[in-house]
Amino acid sequence: MITSGEIHYARVPRALWEDRLLKLKRAGFNSVTSYFFWNYHEPQPGVFDFSGEKDVDAFMGLAAQLGLNVIARVGPYDCAEWDNGGHPDWLISDGFIGRSLDDSYFRYAERWLRVILGKLGKYDKSKGGNMIALQLENEYFWGDVPYHEALAKVAREAGITVDFYTNANRFARNTNFIGTLGLYPDPWMLEPVVSAIKDISSTQPYLPPRVMEYEKGWFSTLVNYPALTDGASRFIDTLTPGILAKYSIIAEAFSSPGVSPTFHRESPIWASIM
C-alpha cells in the first residue's frame, strides 16, 4: 500500500525540505506527493528556471535519500489554491481557451510537460528511480477525455512508464488513466465518503479505491473561522479511518506547511492512499 503525505516544495523553503520530509517519514508515510507548478518554473514564455529554491533534482534526490517514493502532480493545471492553478500569467489572454486542445493553450501546455517530464524521467520507477506515479490535470470534473488522452500521449512520448492518475474526473476512469478520489468529509458527515468509494469501486472494479486527496474538511478564512468543536474533530480523526479501512484502504494524513497566506487549512492537509 502507498500512503503519501502532501508537501509542495514550492511552498517550503529549500532549507526546510529535509526537515519536512523527515517528519513525513517519521509519521509513517512511505511516499510524498507534490505539485510541480508550471508558472513557478516558466515565469516568461520559453524561459525555465530550476535553480535554487526551484531545484527539482534536489527535491527528488532528497526524497530518494530518505527512502520516500514520489507521486508527481505536474498539471498543466493543478488548482491547489495556487495562483491561476499553476497557469502562467503570460498564457492568459483574450481568446485563451484553457485546459483544452485549443492551440491557444495546448501547444504551451505540451511544451511545459515535455520540459518537466524531461527533468523527472530519470526518476521513473522503471529506471530504478523513486517516482512511482504521475498525475496529469486535476479536478477536471466535467470530463474532456480527448484532452486527457492527449496529455497522456505527451507523457508516454517523454518516456514516462509509471501509472497515470487523474483526480476527481469520473469520466477519465478506464482510459489511460486510473481515477482517484478527492475526499473532504465535514464533521459528522461521512456519507459522501462512503458513497464516493462505492461509486469508484463499481466503475473501476479491477483496482482498489485510490484516494489522491484526503482531508477532514475544507479551508476556512482567517477572518471567519468556523466553530469546530474538539469533539467533532476527534470524531472525524477516529471514525473516518475505520470507514475507509472497511473498503481496504488505510487513511493517513500529513500536515503540509505553506498554503496561500489568505486562508487557513484544517490540519491535516492532504494524503494519498493507493
Image (cartoon, rainbow, N blue to C red):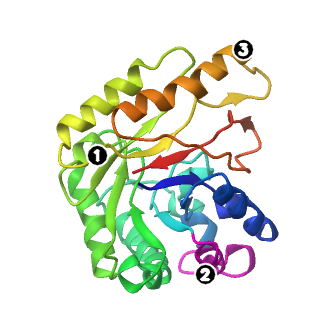
Horizontal side of 194 relative to 2 (left or right) equals left
Query: Label 3 to label 1, Cα distance in Å?
Result: 33 Å
Which three-letter amino acid code belongs to the residue tagged 2? Asp
Q: Residue at x 59, y 53 (%)?
A: 6
Q: Residue at x 59, y 64 (%)?
A: 39
Q: Residue at x 25, y 71 (%)?
A: 153
Pointer 3 with pointer 1, Cβ within 8 A = no
Secondary structure beneath label 3:
loop
Q: Residue at x 18, y 51 (%)?
A: 174
Q: Is 59 a magenta residue?
A: yes
Residue 13 position by quadrant? bottom right
Residue placed most toward the observer, 39 or 32: 32
Q: Is residue 185 above or below residue 268?
A: above
Q: Is residue 177 visible?
A: yes
- Residue under circle 2? 57
Q: Nearer the viewer's eye, disc 2 or disc 1?
A: 1
Query: Label 2 to label 1, Cα distance in Å?
Result: 32 Å
Which three-letter amino acid code belongs to the residue tagged 3? Thr
Residue 96 position by quadrant? bottom left
Q: Position of residue 191 (x, y in %)?
A: 40, 18
